[in-house]
Each structure stands twice: as structure tokens, then as C-alpha cells.
Image: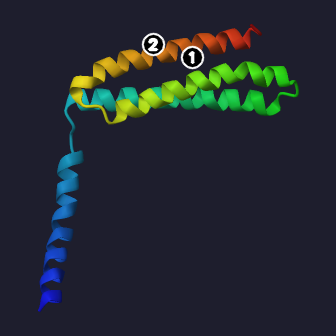
């Protein structure tokens, strides 16, 4: 008797779950879409920069080159941590974290530019 009850509950849950997921993912509001687009674009930018830095350091034969990129990796990691926080941020915290992310990302890009120039 118990197993039939649990089977019934499980069966009903499995029938309702797709509808709940569809309702949650269907047509998010414009703010939610903007946040998702921003986070996706920021993540793609960090990924592209990390791939570039990985390629340069992997192919570098001079240890000094690799050492210069340590600063870039540190800023990339800091930017990625803030981006991760943005992914789960509540609406009230998003703008503050976004501003922090942009400052950190800007610093990382400046460090990257300086390292590219050999500074």
C-alpha cells in the first residue's frame, strides 16, 4: 500500500514538474533578460581573455613572460569571483556588484594591456 502511495505521489510530481519548469523559463521579464545577457557577455569576455593569457603563457619560453602574467591571472580570478556572485545576486545587490565587477574588470584589462606592452 505504501509503495503505491509513493508511486502515485512520484508520478504526480513528474507530471507537474515539466509545467513548473516551463512556467519558470517562459518569457522572463525584461530586467531578467538584461541581467542574463550582461552576465553571459561578461563571462564570454573573461573566458576569451583567459584563453588568450593561457595561450601566451603556455607558449612562452621566457619565465619572465609567465611571471608578468601572474598579475593578469590574479585580476581575472577576482573578476570571475565577482561575476559568480552576480549570477546569484538578488535584485537589490545586483547594481552594486555590477559596479564592483566593472571596476575590477577595467583594472584587469589595464593590467593586461601593460603586460602586453612589456611593462
| SS at mark 1 in the image | helix
**Which mark identifies residue 108?**
1
Dot 2 or dot 1: first in sequence order is 2
Query: What residue occupies the far bottom of the structure in this picture?
Result: 1
Q: Position of residue 87 (x, y in %)?
A: 36, 34
Residue in view at x 63 percent, y 12 percent: 111
Q: How many residues crowd mark 1 within 10 Å: few (<14), some (14–19), many (20+)?
A: many
| SS at mark 2 in the image | helix
Q: Is residue 24 left or right of residue 88?
A: left
Query: What residue occupies the far right of the structure in this picture?
Result: 61
Callout 2 touching callout 1 (CB < 8 Å): no
Residue in view at x 42 percent, y 34 percent: 84
Quarter of the image for the N terminus: give it.
bottom left
Q: Is residue 106 above or below residue 10?
A: above
Q: Position of residue 102 (x, y in %)?
A: 43, 16
Q: Position of residue 95 (x, y in %)?
A: 29, 19
The residue at which mark 2 appears reads as 103
Q: Quadrant of residue 115?
A: top right
Q: How many residues crowd mark 2 within 10 Å: few (<14), some (14–19), many (20+)?
A: few
Amino acid at each position: 500500500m505504501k509503495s503505491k502511495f509513493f508511486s502515485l505521489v512520484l508520478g504526480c510530481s513528474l507530471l507537474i514538474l515539466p509545467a513548473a519548469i516551463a512556467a519558470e523559463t517562459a518569457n522572463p521579464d525584461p530586467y531578467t533578460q538584461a541581467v542574463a545577457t550582461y552576465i553571459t557577455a561578461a563571462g564570454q569576455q573573461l573566458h576569451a581573455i583567459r584563453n588568450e593569457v593561457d595561450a601566451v603563457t603556455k607558449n612562452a619560453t621566457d619565465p619572465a613572460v609567465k611571471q608578468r602574467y601572474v598579475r593578469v591571472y590574479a585580476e581575472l580570478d577576482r573578476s570571475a569571483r565577482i561575476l559568480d556572485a552576480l549570477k546569484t545576486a538578488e535584485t537589490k545587490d545586483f547594481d552594486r556588484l555590477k559596479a564592483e565587477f566593472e571596476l575590477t574588470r577595467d583594472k584587469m584589462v589595464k593590467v593586461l594591456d601593460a603586460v602586453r606592452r612589456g611593462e
